[in-house]
Image: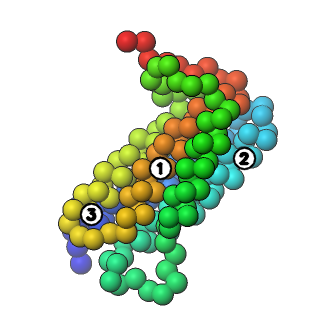
Amino acid sequence: RVAKDDPRIVAYGTVDELNACIGLVRDRNTRYGDDESARARLDELLEAVQQQLFNLGSSLATRIEERRDGQPLVTADHVEELEVLIDTLNEELEPLMSFVLPGGGPVGAMLHLARTVCRRAERATLSLSRAETIDANDLRYLNRLSDALFVMGRWIAKRQGEPEPLWTP
């Protein structure tokens, strides 16, 4: 038994919250926008992310020495897939000349929210890693996922013809 604020519980609980945010994005995505191919592509990407977040939650909930054979885990290949995805989607986007304000239509805005929850999950997982050994791919995945969610937000905004609000210092 552990306390509700144990670093392990906080880490996988925040990953669960992130997964719920992505579920909301997927639901809104099915109902908004004229570019059906972009909606379908985003849904496919986010479903894969949700599957990996369950694997990540399982990893964070289980001490490394207590893992069972065949337990689904996030691997270096999953991290690499996110890096390729970021590069692929970025090819369709204009280079940034300013910070982006969260927005870009309802789906883009929700992806920005998911990105911030992902960053919090990353911080919680880092705190857990200071208390005990965790799989390095767990942190790497969350780090790359937050960047992927940012790029997905920009990408879907562009594909749906939404303005991308930029910061004006």
At mark 2, the secondary structure is helix
Residue beneath disc 1: 144
Front-lying residue, 57 or 168 = 168
Amino acid type, label 2: Arg
Q: Position of residue 163 (x, y in %)?
A: 61, 20
Q: Residue at x 37, y 64 (%)?
A: 136
Q: Which residue is tagged 2? A: 41
Vertical relation: 116 (above or below) 71: above
How far apart in space, not on screen, are marks 3 and 1 (Cα)?
17 Å
Residue at 42% in and 56% down: 140
Q: Which mark is first along the chain, 1 or 2?
A: 2
User: Where in the figure is residue 53, as x and y percent of width and height?
Assistant: 50, 61
Question: Quarter-wise, where is residue 158 in the image?
Answer: top right
Label 2 vs 3, first from the N-terminus: 2
Q: In which quarter of the image is the N terminus?
A: bottom left
Q: Which mark's residue is nearer the viewer, 2 or 3?
A: 3
Q: Which residue is drawn at 44% across and 23% down?
A: 99
Q: What amino acid is at disc 1?
A: Arg
Whether 47 is drawn above or below 164: the answer is below
- Decide: marks 2, 3 in contact (CB < 8 A)? no
| Disc 2 crowd, CA 10 A, few/some/many (<14, 14-19, 20+) | few
Q: Where is residue 104 in the image (x, y as percent from the top left)?
A: 58, 26
Amino acid type, callout 3: Ser
Marks 3 & 1, CB-CB < 8 Å contact? no
Residue marked by disc 3: 129
Q: Which structural element holds mark 3?
A: helix
Q: Is residue 65 left or right of residue 91?
A: left
